[in-house]
Image (spheres, rainbow, N blue to C red):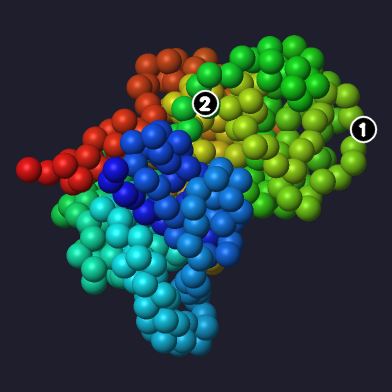
Amino acid sequence: MKKITFCGGGSAGHVMPNIALIEDLKEDYKISYCGTAGIEKGICQKFGVRFFEYEAIKFVRGKIFCNFAIPFKLFKSVRKVKKFLQAEKPDLVFCKGGYVCVPTAIAAKQLKIPIITHESDISAGLANKFIAKFCNKVLCAFLQTAKSFKNGVCVGAPMRKNLFTKSRAAALNFFGLKNRQTVLVFGGGSGSKTINDSLIKALPTLCKSLNVLHICGKGNFVDLKIEGYKQVEFVDDMGLAYACADIVVARCGANSACEITALKIPALFIPLENKRTRGDQVKNAEYFYSLGTCRVLRENNLNENTLTQNIMLALNDGEIKNALAKINYECANDKIKNEINKILYAD
């Protein structure tokens, strides 16, 4: 049986797409995963994926002095990963971008192990730009991103296939919500204080006519007794959450934006934008807005009133619904598996 080692971490956006692929590949390949003690370790343990741990150093934007030790720590990480790969002997390393992948890509290149990386964003991340030259292929969710790499291939975004199988009635029952229009709100794996604060102020108006299902992020729970409002810190099965939704309010990480679009749910995107980001979510939001599938509310314009107004406008926007009906955005797992097989079973 062929072996694949996956890598990716630092945020759920770099882990869950790997898990989506692992779920589809685990019957045909022997799977292992390497990453840090961060979110990826806990997720892999939960899904029963064999895990190897090492340290990875993140480049800190705007803070030069914080980055001086990177070359020395990177050398140590590469050496540790290399020992794991020598013992594991994978036939392929699959990276999902992010700083966690850099030591693994370097070690795999030194050992002449084929490498594939996947880039979800319109604007390629620094890590993927760096490791692209080591990779046999850079798979991309968007065509314009693929064109920016010599070895780029547009395949779309990996997704868990159970996102598409959930019943609305069962989902509403699971969350204890009545059968009326529902707003799903989330702000990423750790939540978003900015979105949470504005939403809580808007709840008295929104819940007069709508359900609000709010995934607030770990440690952000506030006990509010408002009819039609359900707050949870985290949802294991996003398929159930999406099945409730008549509209989604979210950041614009590429993975969730692709899922929402594939499920044909109108969206209000509030992209993350600060000095610690490269502006990737803004570019993602601009792309989906150009397709007509969402509204976009910039964070500096976010308050309880603009949030309420934009939710109601998006919810009742027939043009958004028409654009979603025409778009054909699919789960890319099968295309990615095909690209993997081209390398593993090349003549």
The amino acid on which the numbered mark 2 sits, given as a three-letter code, is Asn
User: Residue 149, percent across and down?
Assistant: 21, 54
Marker disc for residue 109: none
Q: SS for tag 2?
A: helix
Q: Is residue 215 left or right of residue 246?
A: right
Q: Nearer the viewer, mark 2 or mark 1?
A: 2
Q: Quadrant of residue 254?
A: top left
Residue occupying the point 75% across, 28% down: 212
Q: CA distance from mark 2 to mark 1?
A: 31 Å
Residue occupying the point 19% across, 54% down: 136
Residue extending farthest to the left is: 347
Residue extending farthest to the right is: 225
Residue occupying the point 48% across, 43% down: 19
Mark 1, residue position: 225
Residue occupying the point 22% across, 51% down: 137
* Residue in front for this viewpoint, 312 or 79: 79
User: Residue 5, percent across and down?
Assistant: 37, 54
The amino acid on which the numbered mark 1 sits, given as a three-letter code, is Lys
Vertical order, 299 against 261 (above or below): below
Q: SS for tag 1?
A: loop
Q: Is residue 273 left or right of residue 211?
A: left
Q: Quadrant of the C terminus?
A: top left
Other-residue count near label 1 (Cα within 10 Å), few / some / many at <14 / 14–19 / ≥20? few
* Residue in front for this viewpoint, 156 or 37: 37
Vertical order, 127 against 169 (above or below): below
Vertical order, 85 against 209 (above or below): below
Is residue 293 visible in the rendered image? The answer is no
Q: Earlier in the sequence, mark 2 or mark 1?
A: 2
Mark 2, residue position: 162
